[in-house]
Image (spheres, rainbow, N blue to C red):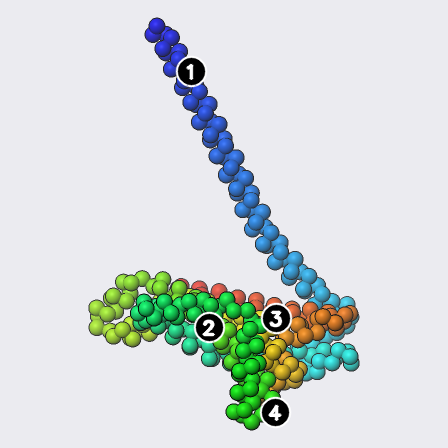
Amino acid sequence: MINQEVTNKNQIATKDKNKSGKSNNRKYLIENISSKVFMISASISVISLLLIIGFVFYKGLTPFLFKGYSFMEFLTGTDWLPSSDEFGVAPMIIASLIATIGSLLIGVPIGILTAVFLSEIAPKSVQKIILPAVELLAGIPSVLYGLFGLAFIVPNIQDLLNLPKGQSLLAVILVLSIMMLPTIISVSQTAIKAVPKAYKEGSLALGASKIETIFKVILPAAKSGILAAVVLGIGRAIGETMAVILVAGNSPVIPSSLVDSVRPLTTNIALEMGYAFGTHQEMLFATGVVLFMFILILNLVLRRLTNKGEQ
């Protein structure tokens, strides 16, 4: 009787071990499959990026590597006349840089101060009104910003400055300033909220006022996140196309004032790619290469500034 009970217990234990072994094998199989799925997803992202970069650079550098065009003349040339085989993007580069810098001078202070207001000063009742408005502003299609600029900003510039037309570099700057606000506000607000409360409490305990605490403690502590917000805003300004087309005037000349019509890099590509072919099309891809170089430099600057901020 005792031997039979021992035998039954052994059989039950063996069955339990077999079940646990099958369960473990199933878990290991699921983990292996999951890790491979994650690896494939990450690989798709990297491969897609490499394909895009490779294709754009291949098409954009073909005229300079195989057709005898000079890349420096392309960068410094002031005439864009595809019919005369003249391709110079200096006016587009200058217009893009001035538009980006001008929009930053307006958008960054407003965006950061709005983020500070929402994070540290505004009561919850006000936050419930402003936060949805910022989120809605981020979701508006860019072409609607352009329509707003064309219908409101451009006519007002024309009337106030007594110009023959209001489509100008100034209109581009104002539209881009509005467009970058949601990005700067949301990212800056997240960075400010991530600052430990002990910093604020310690500053107030030492006798600093609320405004002194914000500008001398909280903002320096959130510097790396705010820099990220600024660079993302720059990327939005440089890469914007549809809104800029409607308010820029699209004249491929070097601007001498803020009221001149301009043609930024993205606008140049969007306007002519639909009918371009041959060398003309390849030069538009070369314009994309220049734009990509700007974005790459911005990312490198962001990494350098972020590392300094963390140190």
Viewer-side label of 4, 1: 4
Q: Amino acid at mark 2?
A: Leu
Tag 4 residue: 164
Q: Nearer the viewer, mark 2 or mark 1?
A: 2
Secondary structure of the residue carrying tag 3 is helix
Alpha carbon separation for disc pair 4 and 2: 30 Å
Residue type highlighted by circle 1 = Gln
Horizontal and vertical percent position of residue 9 = 38, 15
- What whole-number distance in Å separates the C-alpha atoms at marks 4 and 1? 96 Å
Snapshot quadrant of residue 47: bottom right
Could you give the CA–CA distance between mark 2 and mark 1, rounded to whole angstroms? 70 Å
Q: Position of residue 266 (x, y in %)?
A: 62, 73
> Can you identify the residue that label 1 sits on?
11
Label located before the other in sequence (4 or 2)? 4
Residue that lies at the very extreme toward the top in this rendered image: 1
- Left or right: 131 as drawn, with respect to 59: left
Q: Which mark is residue 299?
A: none
Q: Is residue 91 visible?
A: no
Q: Which residue is mark 2?
A: 181
Does residue 32 appear anywhere in the picture? yes
The type of residue carrying mark 3 is Leu
Q: Which residue is mark 3?
A: 291
